Amino acid sequence: MGLIIILFLTLLARTKPENQTCKVIEKAELMEFSRDGDLNIAGVFSITSTRTLVDNDYQAIPYNHRELKFARTMIFTVEEINRDPSLLPGLRLGYKVYNGCGTENLIRAAIEAINGNDPLACGGQTLVVLGHSSSGVSSDINTIISAVSVHLSTCACLSDKARYPTFFRTVPSDKFQITALVQLMKYFDWRWVGIIHSVGTYAEEGASEFVKEAQKEGVCVEYTMVYLETSRSRLRTIIETLKESSSKVVLMFMPLSFAKTFLYHMEEYNITGKQWVGSESWISAKYLASAERKHILHGAIGYAIPQASIPGLGEFLLSLKPSDEPHGALIKNIWEEFFDCSFTPSNTSTLCTGAEDLRTVLSDYTDVAKFREENNVYTAVYSVAFALHLLMQCENGLNPTMGNPCLTKDEILIHYMFWKGRINFTTKNGARVFFDENGDSIAKYDLVNWQMKEDGSADIFIIGQFDNSSPEGKKLKLKEYAKIVWGGYNNVVVRSVCREPCPPGTRKAVNKNKPVCCFDCFQCSEGTISNKTNNCVPKPTEYLSYTETTGTLLTGFGTFGVFLSLLITTIFFTHKETPIVRANNSELSFLLLFSLKLCFLCSLTFIGRPTQWSCMLRHTAFSITFVLCISCVLGKTIVVLMAFSARRPGSNMTKWFGPVQQRVSVLILTLVQVVICIIWLTINPPFPKRNMQYYKDRIILECALGSAIGFWAVLAYIGILATLCFVFAFLARKLPDSFNEAKLITFSMLIFCAVWITFIPAYFSSPGKFTVAVEIFAILASSFGLLFCIFAPKCYIILLRPEQNSKKRIMGKM
C-alpha cells in the first residue's frame, strides 16, 4: 500500500545508557510539525514524492496530499485525546511529524524520531511504535527497532510472532482480505480468474496467498502477471494476455501508486468484456476515475476499509492555513500547488494570500465526505492512549509516568495491549478496537462497486460487507436490493469458468495437463448417472415397495380383502344349514370364497423388489386363482340355469350337472390355465429387468413378461370364462328373484369385465412402478366386486333379516 505512517511514543526526558556506543549516520532533519507534551507521539509520512518517471509516461505529483491528510488526522486525534479529561488525566500528549520518502529515508526518519535530535541517543526509552502501512518498510522497521509497534500494514507475513513479537496493527491483515476475495469469487461462481500484481511485499505476498487459498476453494488462476512501471515489454505481455485469455475476471492486486500508473497505461488499449476486481489499497480511490478509464473501472468490484464518521475531522482538515506552521515551508509549498499561486512575487503566477478556501480545491486532502484509512490512523493513536490509560493504573498504585518500572520495559506495554487482551475499547465514533493473538484487529470490509458516469466521474456504492467474525457461510453479505453494475457493460453477473459443468449423463475427469477447473467430460457408463459433483454414480432404483404410500395402501386393501373373505366364510360356515347358504350349491360358495382369498393374497406378490421367483409367482398365481374364481362363478351360473330347466316337465338336466360334474368342471377349467402357465414358464418365463430407457435419472426394477404370448394367453382365457359367465347370468336374470342369484352374478361380471377392459390401456400408459400399481388395483377391484355383489346380499339376510332365511320364503314365488 502507498499509505505510509509511523507513530511512536517516547518520553521527553531520556538518559543515555552507560557503556553503549552508536554508529553516527548522516542527520536527516526530517521533522515538519511538532508540539511538545508530557509524552510525545511521533509519525513519519511520505508527504514529499521523489519517484522517477520513465519517458514521461505519467506526470509526477510533488506532494502526496493523501499522506498530508493522514498526518493531520494524527494531530487531530492527539488534540481530541487531550480534550478528554477522563482518558489521560494529568497527562498531555504531544506530537512530532516527520516527512520521509523511500525506504531509506523512512527508516532514517524513524530512527531520528526515536532518538530525538541526538543521533547518539540510540538507547532512548521508546514505549510504542505505531507504524507503517507499506509492508516492506514495516518489516524493516520492526526488524531494526525492538519497540512495541502498532502498524497500518496489511501483509499477512507480519503476523508471525516469532519474527515480529512486538507487532500490532489497526487494519485487517491481508490474510482476511485474501479470504474475503476468495469468498467473493465463490459467491458469484467466478472459478476462472487472472491476476495482475505489482512488485513489492504487499502485492507479491497477496497474489501468492490468493492463489493458494483459491485452489482450496476450487477457484483456478489462468495467469499471474507482474506489472513493472518501467518495462514496456512487460506491459505489452500483459495486454496480449488480457486479449487472449478466456477468463472474464481479473484481480488487480497492487498498491495505489502502481494502480495509478497501470490504469494510465491501460487508457490507450481497448480491453473490454472483463470484470475487474480490485484490492483494498486502490478500490476506494475515487479520483482514479476518468473518461478514458471507463471501459476498465465501470463495474469494478472490491473490498475497501469500512468507511467511518469522525466528527470534527473534516472541519479540522479544511481549516488548515499556512499560518498554522509559519516556520515550515511544507504547507506553503502545498498551498502554492493547491491554488496555483506563489508566496514570492512572480510574473508567472498570482500572489498567495494564505486566506484561500480549501473547500474550492478538489484533491485527496479535501475529500472529507467519507473516511476510511483515516479511521485507522484515528484508532491507532487511540489504542496507544488506552494502553497508557491502563498503565497509569498500575497494580502497585504508583504512577508509571513518574519513573515507575512499568514503563521501563516494552514487555509491560505488550502485556497490557496484547497478552492480557486489555486493549478492547470503542472510540467516540463507535469503532471497536482490540487485538487478537496475532496482534491483528477486527477484520471487516465494505464491498464496493464502481458506477461510472458519462463525464468520466464515478460513484462508489457499498453493495455488501464482509465480517470475518461472523459464522462460516455468513461472512459475506450483500445488501438486499443493491443495484450492482457489472464489468464489460454486462446486465447480469459475468460468467467466468474454464469449463461449464458437465451435462447430465456425463462425468468430470481431471486433465493432468490443465488446471483442475479445466476438466473433461465423459459419458457415464450404462446404469450410472452424474450427480451434482459431476461424478457418475449408480442410478437410484425404483420399484413398488411396502414402505411407500402407494404400496402401503394397496397392501392394506389386499389384507382387508382377505379379512373380509374370512369373515364371510365364518358367517357362512356357522349358518351352513340355513336355506340361503345351501341354495345354489354351498360347496361352490365356499370354494369361491377360498379362491377370492387367494386373489387378494396374490396381489401382495406384486409388491416388493422383483426377483426371479417373485416374477414367476405373481403372474402364474394371479392367472390360476382368477380362473379358479371365475370357474366357480360360472359353475354357480350353470347351476341356476340347470335348476330351472329341471323343473320343466320331462327334463332330466339335473343329472347331467350335479355336484360331481360341478367339481369336475371347476377342476378342468382351472387345469387348462395351469397347463398354459406351465408352458409359459417352460419356454420363456417372466424375469426381473432393469428398465433404464423409460427414465434417464433412475432405473425401474420390473418383471419382464418373458413371453408376451403367454401373458396375453392367460388373460384371454380369463376373459373367455368371464364372458361366458356374463352371458349365462344374463340369460338367467329374469328367473324368480327369491331363488336365484343370476342378477347378482350379472352385475359382478359386469364390474369384472369393465375393470379388466379398462386395465389394458391403463397398463400400457402407466410409467414405471405405477404399471404394477395399476395391475394390483385391477386385481383388488375385480375381487372386491365379486365378493360384495355375490355375498353381501346373503350376509345381509343372514345377519339382519333372519326371518327371510327360510325355505318357504326362498321357494315362495315358485
Image: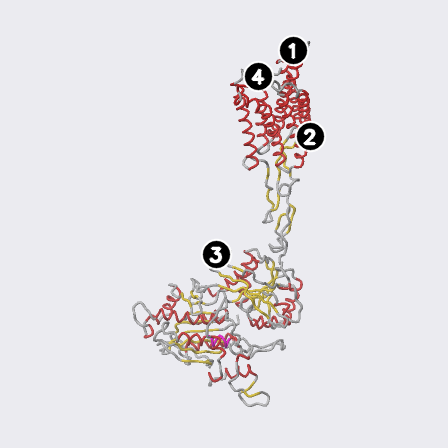
Give the residues in magenta.
67-73
Q: Sort mark 2 into few (<14), some (14-19) or many (20+) by Cα contacts within 10 Å.
A: few
Tag shown at residue 471: 3
Specify the amino acid type for callout 1.
Answer: Lys
User: Which label's residue is closer to the chain start, 3 or 2?
Assistant: 3
| Helix, strand or loop under label 1 | helix
Residue 729 pos. (x, y %):
66, 21
Q: Which residue is mark 2?
A: 708
User: Which label's residue is closer to the chain start, 2 or 1?
Assistant: 1
State which mark lies toward you, 4 or 2: 4
Q: Report the Cα–Cα distance between label 3 and label 4.
A: 86 Å
Q: Report the Cα–Cα distance between label 4 and label 2.
A: 51 Å
Residue 363: image quadrant is: bottom right
Mark 3 and 4 residues: CB-CB less than 8 Å, in contact? no
User: Which label's residue is closer to the chain start, 3 or 1?
Assistant: 3
Q: Which residue is mark 4?
A: 809
Q: Is residue 756 above or below residue 801?
A: below
Kindly report the secondary structure that dominates the magenta region of the rendered protein. Answer: helix
User: Which label's residue is closer to the chain start, 3 or 4?
Assistant: 3
Q: Which residue is mark 1?
A: 655
Q: Report the Cα–Cα distance between label 3 and label 2.
A: 62 Å
Specify the amino acid type for callout 4.
Answer: Arg
| Helix, strand or loop under label 3 | loop
Residue 194 pos. (x, y %):
60, 62
Q: Sort mark 4 into few (<14), some (14-19) or many (20+) by Cα contacts within 10 Å.
A: some
Residue 509 pos. (x, y %):
62, 50
Extreme-top residue of the structure:
650
User: Which label's residue is closer to the chain start, 4 or 2?
Assistant: 2
User: Which label's residue is closer to the chain start, 4 or 1?
Assistant: 1
State which mark lies toward you, 4 or 1: 4
